[in-house]
Image (spheres, rainbow, N blue to C red):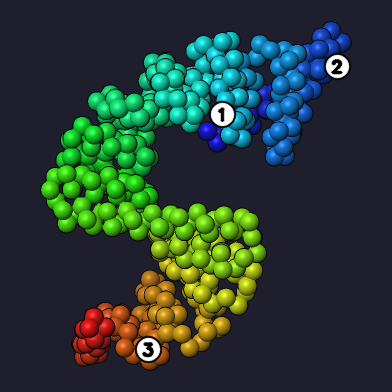
Amino acid sequence: MRETKKFVCVFCLCFMLIAISIQGKSDVNPRHLEYGAHLEKGFIMLFHGDNKGAIAEFEKALAIEPNHYEIHHYLGMIYADNDFWNKAVEAYNRSLELTPDNIEALYSLGMAYFTLREWKKASEPLQKAIALAPQHARAHDVLGRVQVKLRQFEEAVETLTKAAELNPTVPGIYHELGTAYLNLKKYKEAIPHFKKAIQFAPSDPQPHHGLGTAYLRMGEREKGRIEMLRFQQLQKEFAEYERLSRLTHVEPENIEAWAGLGRLLLRQKNYADSIPAFQKCIQLDSKNASCYHGLSQAFINLGYPVPAREAVLNAIRIRPNEAILYNTLGSTYAMQGDILNAIRAFLQAAELEPKVPYYHLNLAKLYDQIGNQKLAEEHYQLYERFKKEASR
């Protein structure tokens, strides 16, 4: 539903062309000019983020010329963007009274009813949108979710299967498909869909709950237990993400909130989103080594060794005796095939903390690459020794 500006942008260009074409014409109805003035002012307000002002201007425009179906639709979208869902429903219905086959207005109305949890009312416009546009992926998606809510599971499987064909990378579709199969007691069919949802949204707890439930009902207790534990862990992380996100909005200068948000996103493998969090932390505190290190790890996982190295070198300048930083530095060199510099960095890490097993494992692998079997074996033995000690 957050597509208002994209639609409005296109319409605004069209409107401006029309406005230019009528300027200077003496025979234009003054009331039509007034309609156009309110509309233009509304778009300007919208682009400046004044949604309430834009709503007022669009309403004034429609009070003069009420038969513009597209303006009712856009007004509904602005209402929806501001969570005025009942008003959005009214606007979409007015648009559809004027043009009953407006596919996007039908979809928008169905989405509004879905958000209001009025499942039966949502179904009709969505089905009509699909009848008019059989390849409308979003309508299939939302209708499938409606059918799950209405416990129409057989119908939901058919609708959501089509949605997945049309838009194969949306995790929510696979989660709803898994849920439909789960309720049909078709547990084997449910499992691959929950796994697909996890593949596309690894930090979402809900598919793990569905997958765990499917395993438990099939009698695979250990697999079910693992998924339920993962569900609980991700639920806690999601709650922490919500807390930190709110905190960064309420207290934008809170360094710990930005650092915590970056670390959480890193743990969730959401590397791209962790980068701006760490950068904001660094902007607030240029001496924060842990944020430079987090930024470096994010770049490494995204496959960018050069900015990763720059970030971790900044961290090392601040904390020159922290072993993990040299280990990360070694990884940036190893990514580019600079084996000798990578070995030097890993050796520095092992010198600072000689009992960390993975520093020695990294060295063993690199020495093996350059054919120094003696040192490779030495460090591999140290890796196994310290790993055993750490597990006691």
Q: From what the image shows, is residue 185 above or below residue 72?
A: below
Tag 3 near tag 1, CB within 8 Å: no
Residue 269 x, y percent position in the rendering: 40, 59
Residue 353: mark in rendering: 3
Left or right: residue 369 compared with residue 30: left
Give the residue type that dot 1 points to.
Trp
Task: Judge depth for marks 3 and 1 and give the one in front.
Answer: 1
- Kindly indicate the quadrant of the structure image that contains residue 227: bottom left
Q: From what the image shows, is residue 168 above or below residue 354?
A: above
Residue 199 x, y percent position in the rendering: 31, 49
Residue 85: mark in rendering: 1
The quadrant in which the C terminus is found is bottom left
Give the residue type that dot 3 points to.
Glu
Residue at 63% over, 19% down: 72
SS state under label 3: loop
Residue at 81% over, 16% down: 33
Q: Earlier in the sequence, mark 2 or mark 3?
A: 2
User: Which residue is labeled 2 in the image?
Assistant: 24
Q: Badge 3: how crowded within 10 Å, few (<14), some, or many (20+)?
A: some
Residue at 66% over, 11% down: 67
Specify whether residue 368 is in view: no
Q: Nearer the viewer, residue 12 or 337?
A: 12
Q: Nearer the viewer, residue 18 or 204?
A: 204
Residue at 40% over, 63% down: 267
Q: From what the image shows, is residue 222 above or below residue 152?
A: below
- Kindly indicate the quadrant of the structure image that contains residue 62: top right
